Amino acid sequence: MPEILRSNPGERADILIDAEIDEVPAPQPTSISPGLGLAYIAVALILCGLNLRTVYSSFSAVLTEITAATGMSGLAVLLMTTVPVTCLGIFAPFAPRLARRFGAERTLLGAMVVLTLGLTARGLGGLPAMFAGALAAGAAIAVVNVLLPSLVKRDFAHRLGLMSGLYTMSICAAAALGAGFTHPIFDATGSWQFALGFWAIPAVIATLIWAPVAIRQRHVPPATAASGPSVWRSRTAWQITAFMVLQAMMSFSVFAWLAPILRDRGTDGGTAGLMVAVSIVLQMGGSLLAPALAVKLRRQSTLNAAAALMTGLGFALSIFGPLQGIWLWTCLLGLGQGALTALALTSIILRTRDSHTAAHLSGMMQGVGYGVGSVGTLLVGQLHQATGGFVAAGVMFLVIGSGAAVFGWLAGRPRFVEDDQPRG
C-alpha cells in the first residue's frame, strides 16, 4: 500500500494531492484572525467549490433557446462547449507557479475574480463576450481546481475526511445546480442572458467571503522549488493518464451535451435539465462508493473496467435506447460516471508510493487528461453537424467506454509508477 494511503487510510484521492508539495520551505497554514475562525475558511472554500462546474452545465441547459434567438453557428456552439474544458488542461500547470509567486490564498482570490467576470460576460449576450467569458471562466477554474485541494489538505489535516466529502459534493452540486436551475430561471425571466449571467451571483458571494482571508495573508516566496520524479517516462503513468483522458471525454460531454441530447429526443427543457441534474447528483454516490471499494482491493482492473463500460453504455442508451427507459439510462450514466471519475483519481495514489510522485502524476493527468479530454465535446458537436443527430455520438461513446475499460484494466494492475523509473 502506498505511503500516502497508509498515513490517511480511506481518504479521497483528489483531496490528498498537494500542488505545493515541491515548495521549500513548505508553506504555512492559512492565518486565522480572531474574527475569522477555521469554520469560516471551510465555508469559504466550499462556496468556491460550488462555482467550479456551473459554466459547463448552465450553457447546455439553454442551448436550444440561445441558438434559436441568435442563430449561433455550429462552429460557435463547438467553441463555447469545448474551450472551457480545454482551458483546464492549458492553465492548470500555471497554478503552482502563481501560488509560489503570490501565495495560494491570493492566487485563489484572483482566480475567483476572473471567474466572476467570465460568468458575467457570458450573460451580456453577443458571441465575442460569451466566448471571452467562457475562456476566462475556464482558465480560472483550472487554477482553482489545482489550489483548492492543496488548501484543504494544508489547513484541515485534522478533518480531512469531512472536508474531502464536503468539497467533492460541492463540485458535483455545482454541476447539478447549473443543469437543474438554468432553464427554470429562463422560464421565469424569458431571458437566456439572465439565465447565464445569474451564475455570476454565487461566484461574487464566494469571492467576497474569501477576500478577507486572502488579503490579510503574508506570503514569502519559497527559496527553491524541489524537483520531483519524472512521471513522463513511466508506462504506468501513461496508462493512468489515458484512463483519465477517456473518462474526461465522457464526463464533460455529459455537462455539454446531455441536455441537448435529451431535448433532441423530445424532452422539454425543464425536464431535460432535471434529468441531467439527477444524473449528476447520482455521480456523488458512485464517487463515494467506488474509491472505498478500490482501496480494499489489491487489483482494481475489474472495477475500473466495469465502471467504464457502465458509463459508455449508459451514455449510448441515453441517445438511442428505448425512450421509456430514459430515466433509467441517465441514472445508469450518472452512477457509472461518478465511479469512473473517482477511480481515475484514486489511481493516482494507488499506483504511486509517495506524495511527490502522486503530485506530479496528478499534474500530468490534469494537463493531458483535460486538454485531450476536451476533444470529446468537440467530436459530439461535429458528429451532430455531420449527421443531423446524436446516434453516431452514441456509437462513439460505446467505443470510448470500451477504450476506457482497456486502460482502466491496465491502470488497475498492482504496479507503481516508480517501478518504471530508470535505475541509476
Image (tube, rainbow, N blue to C red):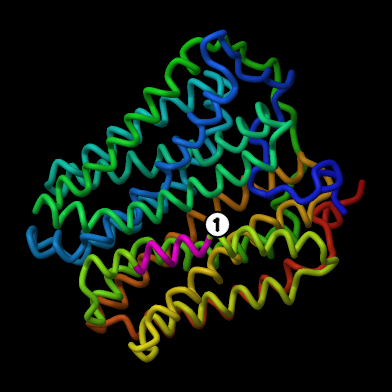
Indicate left or right for 258 with 290 as reference. Answer: left
Horizontal and vertical percent position of residue 377: 38, 65
Task: Determine whether the residue tagged by mark 1 lies in a helix, strand or loop.
Answer: helix
User: Residue drawn 13% across and 46% down?
Assistant: 125
- 205 sits left or right of 133 in the view: right
The reply, left or right, for residue 391 in relation to residue 407 is left
All told, the count of numbered labels is 1
- Residue 106 in the image: above or below residue 112: above
Q: Can you name the residue that lies furthest to the bottom here? A: 322
Amino acid type of the residue tagged 1 in the rendering: Gly
Q: What residue range appears in magenta?
A: 275-283
Residue 366: image x %, image y %?
Answer: 56, 50
Picture coordinates of residue 182, whole percent (x, y): 25, 54
Q: Residue at x 46, y 13 (%)?
A: 215
Mark 1: give few (<14), some (14-19) or many (20+) Cα within 10 Å: many
Residue 137: x %, y % from top left: 35, 41
Q: In the rendered view, would you say 323 is above or below 366?
A: below
Residue tagged by mark 1? 369
Overall secondary structure of the magenta section: helix
Q: Is residue 271 left or right of residue 224?
A: left
Placement of 81 over or under 320, stated as above or below: above
Residue nearest the observer in this picture, 198 or 128: 198
**Residue at image point 68% right, 17% down:** 28
Q: Is residue 383 above or below residue 110?
A: below
Q: Residue at x 67, y 64 (%)?
A: 290
Nearer-the-camera pick, 139 or 263 = 263
Quadrant assignment for the N terminus: bottom right
Q: Is residue 32 magenta?
A: no
